[in-house]
Amino acid sequence: MAILKLDDAARALALSQLPHWSYDPEALGIRRSLRFSDFAEAFGFMTRVAILAEKADHHPEWFNVYNRVDILLTTHDAGGMSDRDVALAQAIDAIAA
Ligand SMILES: C[C@H](O)[C@H](O)[C@H]1CNC2=NC(N)=NC(=O)C2=N1
């Protein structure tokens, strides 16, 4: 399916709907950090996200230590942020809620 790379205006609009996420201009993507009660909760969350990501063929860059998960969403194939990152961010927010 075609990838829709976001221009500055589309990115600003998308970010206004994603209060947990902030744009990183060096990484050309959006970041969110989450904390859980322990490693099992963090890894359970990551497992749920991984299943969705694999289905969508769109994968997060992330880092986990113990109860912390740092996520970067960017679209390598587009060289920046796309509608796929917005969709994955929304799905992540729903899982984390
Ligand atoms: C071949 C495969 O469809 C591509 O490499 C997919 C896989 N997952 C991906 N994930 C992310 N975040 N960006 C991509 O451009 C991307 N491309």
Image (tube, grey):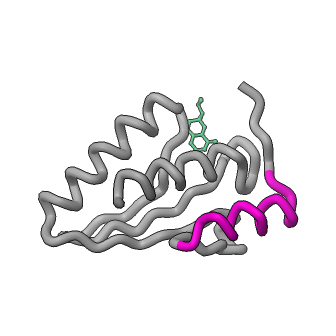
- Nearer the observer, 27 or 21: 21
Q: Residue at x 45, y 28 (%)?
A: 55
Q: Where is residue 39 in the image (x, y as percent from the top left)?
A: 15, 64
User: For this view, does 30 lie left or right of residue 51?
Assistant: right
- Nearer the observer, 93 or 40: 93
Q: Position of residue 63 (x, y in %)?
A: 36, 64
The extreme top residue here reads 1
Magenta segment: 6-19
Q: Assign the N terminus to one quadrant of the image.
A: top right
User: For this view, does 24 lie left or right of residue 11?
Assistant: left
Above or below for 53 versus 10:
above
Q: Which residue is drawn at 75% across and 45% down?
A: 78
Q: Where is residue 27 in the image (x, y as percent from the top left)?
A: 65, 68
Which quarter holds ligand 1? top right
Q: Assign the C terminus to one quadrant of the image.
A: bottom left
**Would residue 15 be counted in the magenta stretch?**
yes
**Would residue 14 be counted in the magenta stretch?**
yes
Above or below for 77 versus 90:
above
- Nearer the observer, 14 or 49: 14
Q: How many labels does the image show?
A: 0
Q: Position of residue 72 (x, y in %)?
A: 52, 62
User: For this view, does 83 lie left or right of residue 9?
Assistant: left
Quarter of the image where one finds residue 38: bottom left
Above or below for 68 versus 75:
below
Q: Main secondary structure of the magenta part?
A: helix
User: For this view, does 76 lie left or right of residue 97?
Assistant: right
Q: Which residue is drawn at 54% across and 39% down?
A: 58
Q: Which residue is drawn at 70% across and 46% down?
A: 83
